[in-house]
Amino acid sequence: MNGNQIEGVIGLGLTLGILVLLALPSLLGFLRDRRVDRQVREGGRDRGAERDQKSSSRSTVPSTATW
């Protein structure tokens, strides 16, 4: 390898390294959002089971507030 090829390889490596550094926060955020969505879905399923077992805690008396 001559000097020009070595410079090209170093430049390519630096470019790919910068690309990874720029894309990494976005990828981590995406993975975090997926985890949160999964937790929300699981929590919704658990609440549905509780709702089937208990009566609603909502008041059946209509609100008298006027807007």
Image (cartoon, rainbow, N blue to C red):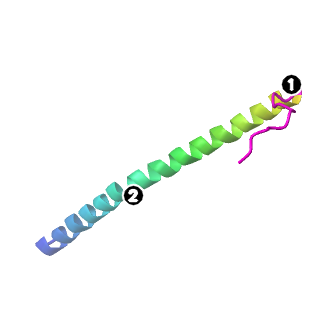
- Answer with the quarter of the image where residue 53 lies: top right
Q: Amino acid at mark 2?
A: Ala
* In front: label 1 or label 2: 1
Which quadrant does the N terminus fall into? bottom left
Q: Mark 2: give few (<14), some (14-19) or many (20+) Cα within 10 Å.
A: few
* Residue 47 vertical position relative to residue 29 in the rendered view, above or below: above
- For residue 24, side relative to residue 56 (left or right): left
- Farthest-out residue, bottom: 4
- Which residue is at the front of the view, 5 or 31? 31
Q: Position of residue 12 (x, y in %)?
A: 26, 67
> Which contiguous range is marked in magenta?
53-67
Alpha carbon separation for disc pair 1 and 2: 47 Å
Q: Please name the residue shown 40% across and 51% down the image.
A: 25
Q: Which residue is mark 1?
A: 54
The secondary structure making up most of the magenta span is loop
Residue sitting at x 80%, y 38%: 63
Between residues 10 and 2, which one lies in front from this camera angle? Answer: 10
Does label 1 or label 2 sit earlier along the sequence? 2
* Tag count: 2
Q: Is residue 36 above or below residue 13?
A: above
Mark 1 belongs to which amino acid? Answer: Lys
Q: Residue at x 70, y 34 (%)?
A: 43
47 or 3: nearer the viewer: 47
Q: Which residue lies under the disc numbered 2?
A: 23
Residue 55 lies in the magenta stretch: yes
Residue 10 belongs to the span the image colors magenta: no
Residue 19 lies left or right of residue 14; in this view the side is right
Q: Residue at x 79, y 38 (%)?
A: 64
